[in-house]
Amino acid sequence: MTRSILFKNVLPYLIWYIALFLATILIDYVLHKLQLVYLGRYLGPAGTFIVIISFVYSLQKRRIINWASPKLLLDVHEILAWIGSLMIMVHAGIHFNALLPWLAILLLIIAVASGFTGKGLLNIAKTELTEKKKQLLKTSISEKEVEDKLFFDSITVDIMKKWRVVHLPITLLLGLITLLHIVSVIMYGK
Amino acid sequence: MKKSVVLLSVMACIFAMFRYPSVMINPGQLLEGHKKIKNDCSACHVMFRGISSEKCISCHKLSEIGMKDRDSTRADRKSTLFHQNLSGQECTACHTDHLGANPEKSFSGFSHDMLQGAAANCLGCHKKPADLYHEKFTENCSHCHSTDKWKPSTFDHSKYFLLDKKHNAECITCHTNNNYGSYTCYGCHEHSESKIAGEHREEGIYNFSNCASCHKSGNEHDIKIPLEYRQGNESQDKSGSKKKEKKKKSKEDDDD
């Protein structure tokens, strides 16, 4: 069971996470090789813009907008956040020396990791819930009683809550630190 | 609780940004002469307005820039005093400070048109390439090089030898030992000294040390013998023609 969870739920996200770093190194290498390092300067604002777009999912989730299915928007959120993070990491790798941008990158890395973890835990919780439901239905108790006895539902919620404890504040802090970084660039830039 | 942690963190960052700007937001090390002002961003920067040229000029008098050259590696260069003619120009158009990924890019705003009179001396700023070819030149860099970029130069190699498809090689293949004043055609596998000697002697040519003088196009069949060679090698040519005729005759005999 542990092996199955590891391969089904953890490994795919771990691969995507590692791919983020490998892709950053690769793009950084190519930009240096082609003497296009200056492009990294523009990848920061572009990546931030893409990440901001990915938050359409959060607006939908909080019922502020109602454009598409949450599932679709979650997929879009994951893809855009990954691409945007990649661009920001390339931007950071090319020219950053100060602590503030370093902090922003550290928070970004944690936010992405917590995002992947959240998605993984969600899948684990769903699988466990389904399994438990099947087992309970095999017994003589009614469906209503099964629903009542689905304490895994609460476990799922607990796990999700734990994940959100990290993901949401870190993302909020990331947003604010990024804002400080942008303001400092505007303040002291040319 | 969570919100207060986030808020406290942000406030701590803001405080640190203003208290320790060189650690928090400095995008790169300052130049040696500016290191003492590393925590005083406002010494050069005006908030939201960029870098004021007046602030630069308050320390660096335009008429004095270049008089004291502290860079020992530039000891061989003459002082290039041209900044006094640049009033009204933005210093940051050419200069930057914080050393980033590409500090050399900081001079992208420089234009050679700014240089006037005596300042328009290439060697006042540029170091001469350390090769034997450039060694003999002391001026007239513009004969081959433009002010847009050093490479490629406007030097027309085809005047001496055409670098066609077959001769698209690295300079060092022909110009060995960093000497662009001489060349060798034996730098590649195609032309061995013995093979070339054999082919030429067969034609009665014994002076074949300067390949490009006759084979300027790089095509072995496109031979243009210079006048001085023709006169000097007249006897060779005659014997060569005799040999050619003899060779042709024997070929005809073979065909019969």
Image (cartoon, coloured by chain):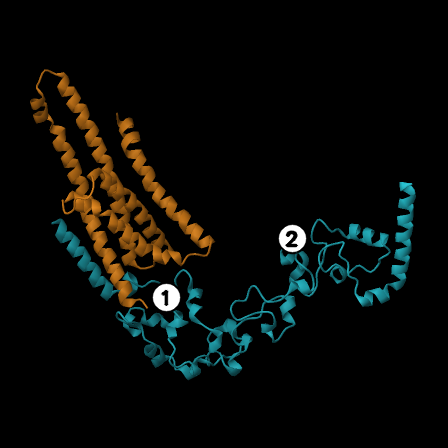
Chain colours: A orange, B cyan
Q: Secondary structure at mark 1?
A: loop
Which residue is at 50% across, 81% downward? B116
First in residue order: circle 1 vs circle 2: 1
Q: Which disc, if any, is residue B165? A: 2
Identify the image quadrant of the N terminus of chain A.
top left
Q: Nearer the viewer, residue B241 or B84?
A: B241
Q: Which disc, if any, is residue B234? A: none
Q: Could you tell me the amino acid type at mark 1?
A: His
- Please tell me whether residue B210 is drawn above or below residue A90 in the rendered image: below
Res A113 visible: no
Which residue is at 70% across, 54% downward? B187
**Chain label for disc 2:** B
Q: Nearer the viewer, residue B25 or B248?
A: B248
**Chain label for disc 1:** B
Res B116 visible: yes
Q: Which disc, if any, is residue B98? A: 1
In the image, taking residue B137 as reference, residue A89 lies left or right, namely left
Identify the image quadrant of the C terminus of chain A.
bottom left
Q: Nearer the viewer, mark 1 or mark 2?
A: 2
Could you tell me residue B59's position as x and y percent?
35, 80
Mark 1 touches mark 2? (CB < 8 Å):
no
Q: Could you tell me the amino acid type at mark 2?
A: Lys
Could you tell me residue A54's position as x and y percent?
25, 47
Could you tell me residue B218's position as x and y percent?
71, 56
In the image, taking residue A144 as reference, residue B216 lies left or right, namely right
Q: Secondary structure at mark 2?
A: helix
Could you tell me residue B81's position as x and y percent?
47, 81
Q: CA distance from mark 1 to mark 2?
A: 45 Å
- Please tell me whether residue A133 is drawn above or below residue B195 in the rendered image: above
Looking at the rendering, which quadrant does residue B12 occupy? bottom left
